[in-house]
Image (tube, rainbow, N blue to C red):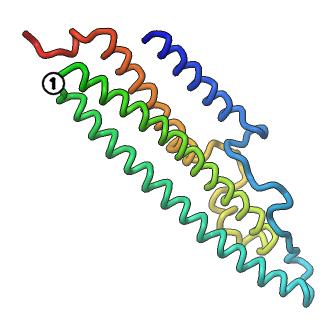
Amino acid sequence: MTSAAVIVAALLAGYVASRLRGPRHREWFIGPLPGEVPTYDHRAPTLSSRTARTELQAFYDRLVQMHRHEYNLFNARLGAFLVVTTLLLNGYANAKTPSLRLTTCTAGLGLSLLVLYLLSRTGGAIQWYTLALFRLEEALYPEDLRPYLTRRGQKSKPPPVSFFLGVVVPLAAVLFWSALLIVTSSHPLLIGDPP
């Protein structure tokens, strides 16, 4: 069981290190590439650029809807994960046999790993949409009419909340279930019913 714990710890450490390092300096998720977001210059509109602006505005509106949809998915998945984790903890606390406790720990660990993967991908999609909307706002609107940029500000780039909720919370659950699995498997008498 110790070798399995070492393998799980090594995999988690590698995953966290790759997420923190990231493909770009100080970016927590991958943003849109320069060619993925159309451009428009709001300072010099012409007749053809007004048509382009209308199309770009429609594209912006679709991105806002998709951004909200990803947030709803993220929140629903996180809420379901927290509820199921609570139920698994309750099942662990009320289990009568060590084998049932081991099964509960294994299920909790598997669920936490799955949710870590899902929420980190959903958080990455949210960040992609946010950065794409930043670029579109710069192209479509004057500086004082940019809701995404004015809300977020340009002072510093801390990690987004979706990083903490989508990576740190499930990772903490993975570490918790791993520790509980190790303790449960190595000390079955500590968790058994008193004589």
- Where in the figure is residue 33, as x and y percent of width and height? 81, 55
Label 1 Cα crowd, 10 Å radius (few <14 / some 14-19 / many 20+): few
Horizontal side of residue 89 vs 123, given as left or right:
left
- Compare residues 98 and 60 and report the one nearer the observer: 98
Residue receiving disc 1: 96
- Where in the figure is residue 136, as x and y percent of width and height? 76, 68
> Seen from this angle, which residue lies furthest bottom?
47
Number of marks drawn: 1
The image shows residue 34, relative to residue 63, as above or below, that is: above
Horizontal side of residue 130 vs 48, given as left or right:
left
The quadrant the N terminus occupies is top left
Please tell me in which quadrant of the rendered image residue 12 appears.
top right
The image shows residue 2, relative to residue 29, as above or below, that is: above
Horizontal side of residue 2 vs 85, given as left or right:
right
- Where in the figure is residue 3, as x and y percent of width and height? 50, 11
The amino acid type of the residue labelled 1 equals: Lys
Q: Residue at x 72, y 47 (%)?
A: 30
- Compare residues 161 and 168 and report the one nearer the observer: 168
Q: Residue at x 85, y 86 (%)?
A: 50
> Seen from this angle, which residue lies furthest left?
195
Q: Residue at x 65, y 74 (%)?
A: 62
The quadrant the C terminus occupies is top left
The image shows residue 146, relative to residue 6, as above or below, that is: below
Q: Residue at x 69, y 62 (%)?
A: 149
- Where in the figure is residue 26, as x and y percent of width and height? 73, 39
- Secondary structure type for disc 1: loop
Please tell me in which quadrant of the rendered image residue 88 appears.
top left
